[in-house]
Image (tube, rainbow, N blue to C red):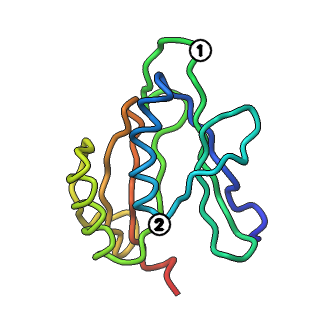
Amino acid sequence: MIRGFVNHIDLTVADVDLSIDFYDPVLALLGYCRTNDYEGGAPCWAITDGERNGFSIALHQARSDRKHDRTSVGLHHLAFHADSREDVDQTYAALRALGVEILDRPAEYDYTPGYYAVFWSDPDGIKLELVYEPRFVS
């Protein structure tokens, strides 16, 4: 395990059932599996490298009706690693087939050399990203 590496993230959503319907197929595209390991009954998905390295995402029901605003204090967006530019393109096509709201089609961005990403939105307006970044590929 890489010390300091992110272990999990919990998202607060307006409608857990709607979000489950969204995240089940989307996270499956990214290699996550639904798990019941999370205490308290929160829906959870996990991914592992088969060794000791893993990460999970869980959902919690919002207790207010305030909408998500990524320009306010809090989560701006959540980005996932891609294996290649082709992986980004193929995932983009699969997201479109699922009817997911695409915010920005696959393109190269000048954040770091070779940065190539697609951006989409979950039902609550949380911005999600799949990025191929050559500097993190061995």
Percent x, y of residue 5: 70, 62
- Pick the residue in front: 112 or 24: 24
SS of the residue at dot 1?
loop
The answer to which image quadrant residue 46 occupies is bottom right
Mark number for residue 81?
2
Mark number for residue 63?
1
Number of residues whose C-alpha sits closer than 10 Å to that of mark 2, classed few (under 14), some (14–19) or many (20 or more): some
- Pick the residue in front: 128 or 13: 13
Q: The N terminus appears in which quarter of the rendering?
A: bottom right
Q: Is residue 49 above or below residue 20?
A: below
The answer to which image quadrant residue 121 occupies is top left
Number of residues whose C-alpha sits closer than 10 Å to that of mark 1, classed few (under 14), some (14–19) or many (20 or more): few
Contact flag, marks 2 and 1 (Cβ < 8 Å): no
Percent x, y of residue 77: 45, 44
Mark 2 or 1 closer to N-term?
Answer: 1
Residue type (three-letter) at the residue carrying disc 2? His
Q: Left or right of 138: which side holds 71?
A: left
- Pick the residue in front: 40 or 129: 40
Please give the name of the residue rendered at 44% of the width and 62% of the height, measured from the top-left corner.
30
Please give the name of the residue rendered at 30% of the width and 58% of the height, measured from the top-left corner.
118
Residue type (three-letter) at the residue carrying disc 1? Arg
Tag nearer the camera, 2 or 1? 1
Q: Left or right of 109: which side holds 75?
A: right
- Pick the residue in front: 109 or 1: 1
Mark 2 to mark 1 CA distance (whole Å)? 31 Å
Percent x, y of residue 49: 63, 74
Q: Is residue 96 above or below residue 73?
A: below
SS of the residue at dot 2?
strand
Q: Left or right of 47: which side holds 29?
A: left
Please give the name of the residue rendered at 40% of the width and 29% of the height, measured from the top-left corner.
124
